[in-house]
Amino acid sequence: MAFQPSTGEPLGRSTRSAAVQLSGIHKTLGGTPVLAGVTMDIKAGEFVTLLGPSGSGKTSTLMAVAGFIIPDSGKITVGDRDVTNLPPGRDRDMGIVFQNYALFPHMTVAGNIAYPLRVRGMSKAHIKDRVDRALRLVRLEGLADRKPARLSGGQQQRVALARALVFEPSVLLMDEPMGALDVRLKQELKWEIRQLQREIGATVIYVTHDQNEAMLLSDRVALMQDGRIEQYASPEEIYRRPTSIFAARFLGDSNLIAGQFDESAGCMTVAASGKVIPAAWPSGSPCHGRCMALLRPEHARISAATELTTPHSPAQDLTTMGAVLEEAVFMGQSMRYRVHVPDLGCALDVQQVAGAGTTALSPGRQVNVSWDPRDLHLITTETAS
Ligand SMILES: Nc1ncnc2c1ncn2[C@@H]1O[C@H](COP(=O)(O)OP(=O)(O)OP(=O)(O)O)[C@@H](O)[C@H]1O
């Protein structure tokens, strides 16, 4: 059924947001497999980000949802409609925002925003009402009569956003919408996009390779590699419990320690030194011997080697090792250290709140590095046989 725009109701919390389902999407382009079985479910009103390195298949996945790429196999549904082979356009009922704005240069801001309503045959009075409300939504009320060339990059992108939202699509697709903006504008627009999506309640699929953007905006992140989804979960879940080394490295900074897990003893033998340290296998993940232990820099602490206590509560059973401080960098709110830990056979990055004691530590000094064993997250490096 072709989409018919509503007319009277406010451009506000959408009652039309739809769930999107991708099942086993494969696509080969020019002999290259670009999508290798993408499967994901997106709930109505959810903000999902496709995150991954360049060439991992993010844009291709989005283009398959938009209809610009027809899958070789697999199925895409929006609500209860099968849209797999539907051409791009009105019947898909999707708003799209690209990195390069794609505004019509000869039209005013209001003209650009009105365009999707005009092609849908809406009456002039309704168009004016809708455009006014869309302008208010993206905070561009005073610029309705300007041409795009006389707008900043951030303003142009807000026009593109208003144009994509004005016909109240059930799904909004965004491909690196902030890719061309400077850092300050990005920072501003990130919060605006988040707030806007919460206001209108639309289902959003958003492409970026910027992990901070993904964490700030998303309900769930689909982390992509080689045309597949490596992990699909909330940003917090991927950050705290990555299921692969790739995921551990891609979202956030990481220290990775190779070892062998001993389930009965509840410990891990460090590969480089044979040192045994307490560790627990995360529940729900496959348990195999060879593993990598992930320790986030903010979960490690250093203290002068002469100090017996660490900033942790003494009630906690910490793992502590001697180390040599290699680098100490003041980062404003925190200090960033690199320490060499002979018992781990590697260097660890440590991030901790800048305090009088820690800023005084200088490179070359003997220190203790410690962590709560519960903050070690083990990832199997053995394939199940
Ligand atoms: N028309 C095409 N013909 C051949 N290969 C293609 C075509 N379009 C995309 N590819 C390849 O498919 C892979 C995935 O591309 P895609 O643009 O989806 O990745 P991406 O994750 O969005 O990357 P980026 O962040 O650089 O935009 C890449 O290796 C790319 O070179």
Image (cartoon, grey):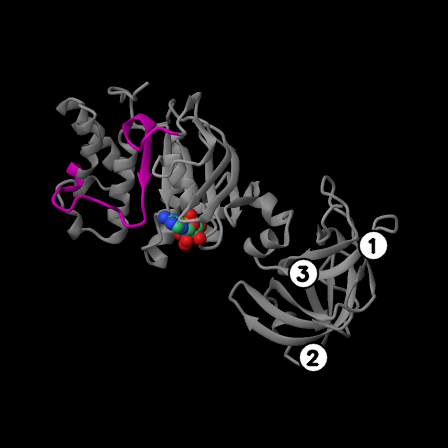
**Amino acid at circle 2:** Arg
Q: Is residue 8 visible?
A: yes
Residue 91 magenta-highlighted: yes
Circle 2 is placed at which residue position? 365
Which stretch appears magenta? 85-111
* Residue drawn where x is 23% and y is 37% of the image: 135
Task: Identify which amino acid the numbered label 3 is placed on.
Answer: Leu
- Name the mark on residue 256: 3
Q: Is residue 345 left or right of residue 171?
A: right
Find disc 1 in the rendering and name its residue.
267
Would you say 359 lies left or right of 301 here?
A: left
Which kind of residue does numbered mark 1 sit on?
A: Cys
Q: Say which of marks 2 and 1 sits in front.
A: 1
Q: Are marks 2 and 1 in contact (CB under 8 Å)?
A: no
Q: Residue 128 at x, y = what percent?
A: 16, 28
**Residues packed near mark 3 inside 10 Å, few (<14), some (14 to 19) or many (20 plus):** many
